């Protein structure tokens, strides 16, 4: 924390980088100086045409013609790596770039390889153990161009700081350029460190400084905004929190988590129709990877609040059906990590979420890569084998993490089951009671206007569309003023998809 705290903004609330625009040459992008100008001109022409497979053939020819020890051979490999990166085969590109960076330290080939690794780590998922621990912290790369130096120094500083080697970490930290992506990533981690130290106001100040700095990358601003939304939610600023949530771009697991957080904020604002729509959207198969029992509990609370007691019981049944396999596994004392539901919930934990996303990315890339007819190239089969080996390695590591977390998750599920059973019991009991005089439990959802066409409604037909999920609503009215509480409630299980024109 002591080293991370150096990124704390000053008392003005602005970033220590200031808000001035840097000089053009202060952190200019690295430009590769080719070994063979004719060859690299062809590569750049093919890049312009987005003919990436042809670059693979061109690079493979170089690797066949030239000896393994020559720079021309390495340049052919660099071209293949660049083509694969453009085709989004990021792990294949990572393997090639790491090989080049290790073999060509201190050369433009080595610089270019590190530069592309920098690009991958900013944009895609990767294995930090392989790239940071086993590679970047195992080699001395010498003096590097400023942009590349920031990438290497950040990873070395973070690694050393994590193990308490601040004496080694601090010199590397000072090499991180104040306008680089990695300076803002360091600021972001420093804010998380303050949250862990239970000083959320300092964290909020740093997150805010990131979002207000014009030099901060959008991806880091998004991560900062997620945390700002969570912190101000805890302060009761639900409307402002929702404004932030609504403009975030997220991965699948984080998207499901944030949709649930939005539902809670909407519930506290008493927009029950919108909140129920979000909760029902979370039942889409798309969100299986981000399963959370809280969505069912919140749904029951809302229906109970509006005196839809039979619907509470229906939600209880859906909860029990959704988590039945997990409860069976717990009751039979079987290995918890083998249950798919418990495993998915473990993979939602922040410290392994990116690893799980990396495995998903790895498998998609492997399936797509196999479709290419590159079997004649020696590097291709080796590349596919390394994908398979990395998948197996990550599975072993993730299994260990899931085993470590599964006991606590099982305990959380049992606690949730107690809450659900209580809601089930109290809903059945409340159905026999009369609402106390003066208790305000009235609610009416938005009415469909059949004369105006500024807003259109469509009845939910069982299909989920990603771009429409935030607009789902359950058109519901409180039944608490009804005299007969045991009568069947109005139908609330149909979700209307609202689209604004």
Image (cartoon, rainbow, N blue to C red):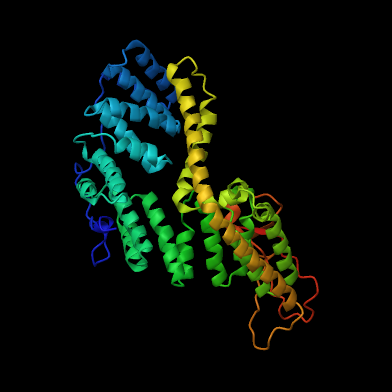
Residue sitting farthest toward the bottom: 437
Q: State the quadrant of the C terminus.
A: bottom right
Vertical comparison of 27 with 300: above or below: above
In the rendering, at what x and y percent does residue 152 appear?
27, 40
Residue sitting farthest toward the front: 333
Residue 50, image quadrant? top left
In this orientation, does residue 476 appear?
A: no
Q: Foreground residue, 52 or 381?
A: 381
In the rendering, at what x and y percent does residue 374 appear?
49, 19
Residue drawn where x is 43% and y is 20% of the image: 379
In the rendering, at what x and y percent does residue 461 appear?
71, 52
Image side of residue 442 versus residue 396, left or right: right
Q: Foreground residue, 329 or 118?
A: 329
Q: Foreground residue, 419 or 66?
A: 419
Vertical comparison of 221 with 439: above or below: above
In the rendering, at what x and y percent does residue 139 appear?
26, 34
Residue 153, image quadrant? top left
In this orientation, does residue 223 appear?
A: yes
């Amino acid at each position: 924390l002591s080293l991370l705290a150096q990124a704390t903004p000053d008392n003005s609330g602005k970033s220590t980088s200031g808000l001035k625009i840097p000089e053009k040459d202060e952190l200019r992008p690295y430009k590769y100086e080719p070994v063979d100008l004719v060859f690299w001109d062809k590569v750049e022409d093919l890049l312009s045409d987005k003919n990436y497979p042809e670059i693979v053939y061109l690079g493979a020819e170089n690797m066949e013609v030239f000896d393994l020890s020559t720079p021309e051979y390495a340049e052919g490999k660099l071209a293949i790596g660049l083509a694969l990166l453009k085709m989004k085969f990021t792990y294949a590109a990572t393997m090639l770039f790491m090989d080049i960076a290790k073999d060509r330290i201190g050369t433009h080939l080595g610089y270019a390889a590190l530069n592309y690794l920098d690009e991958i780590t900013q944009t895609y998922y990767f294995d930090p153990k392989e790239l940071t621990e086993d590679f970047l912290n195992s080699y001395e790369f010498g003096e590097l161009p400023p942009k590349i130096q920031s990438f290497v120094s950040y990873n070395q500083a973070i690694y050393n700081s994590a193990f308490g080697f601040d004496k080694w970490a601090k010199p590397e930290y000072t090499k991180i350029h104040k306008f680089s992506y990695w300076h803002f990533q360091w600021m972001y981690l420093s804010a998380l460190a303050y949250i862990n130290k239970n000083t959320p106001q300092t964290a909020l100040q740093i997150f805010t400084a990131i979002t207000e700095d014009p030099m901060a990358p959008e991806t880091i601003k998004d991560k900062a905004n997620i945390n700002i939304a969570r912190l101000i939610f805890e302060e009761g600023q639900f409307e402002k929190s929702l404004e932030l949530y609504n403009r975030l771009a997220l991965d699948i697991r984080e998207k499901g988590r944030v949709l649930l957080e939005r539902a809670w904020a909407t519930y506290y604002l008493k927009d029950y129709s919108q909140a129920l729509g979000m909760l029902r959207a979370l039942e889409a198969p798309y969100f299986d990877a981000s399963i959370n029992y809280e969505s069912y509990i919140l749904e029951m609370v809302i229906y109970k609040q509006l005196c839809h007691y039979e619907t509470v019981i229906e939600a209880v049944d859906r909860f029990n059906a959704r988590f039945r396999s997990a409860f069976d596994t717990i009751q039979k004392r079987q290995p918890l990590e083998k249950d798919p539901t418990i495993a998915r919930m473990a993979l939602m934990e922040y410290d392994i979420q990116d690893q799980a996303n990396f495995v998903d990315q790895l498998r998609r890339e492997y399936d797509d890569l196999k479709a290419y007819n590159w079997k004649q190239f020696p590097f291709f089969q080796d590349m596919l084998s390394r994908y398979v080996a990395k998948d197996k390695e990550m599975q072993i590591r993730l299994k260990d993490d899931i085993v470590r977390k599964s006991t606590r998750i099982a305990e959380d599920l049992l606690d949730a089951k107690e809450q659900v059973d209580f809601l089930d019991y109290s809903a059945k009991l409340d159905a026999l009671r009369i609402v106390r005089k003066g208790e305000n439990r009235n609610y009416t959802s938005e009415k469909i206007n059949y004369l105006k066409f500024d807003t259109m409604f469509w009845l939910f037909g069982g299909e989920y569309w990603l771009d429409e999920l935030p607009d789902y609503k359950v058109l519901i009215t409180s039944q608490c003023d009804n005299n007969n509480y045991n009568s069947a409630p109005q139908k609330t299980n149909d979700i209307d998809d609202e689209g604004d024109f």
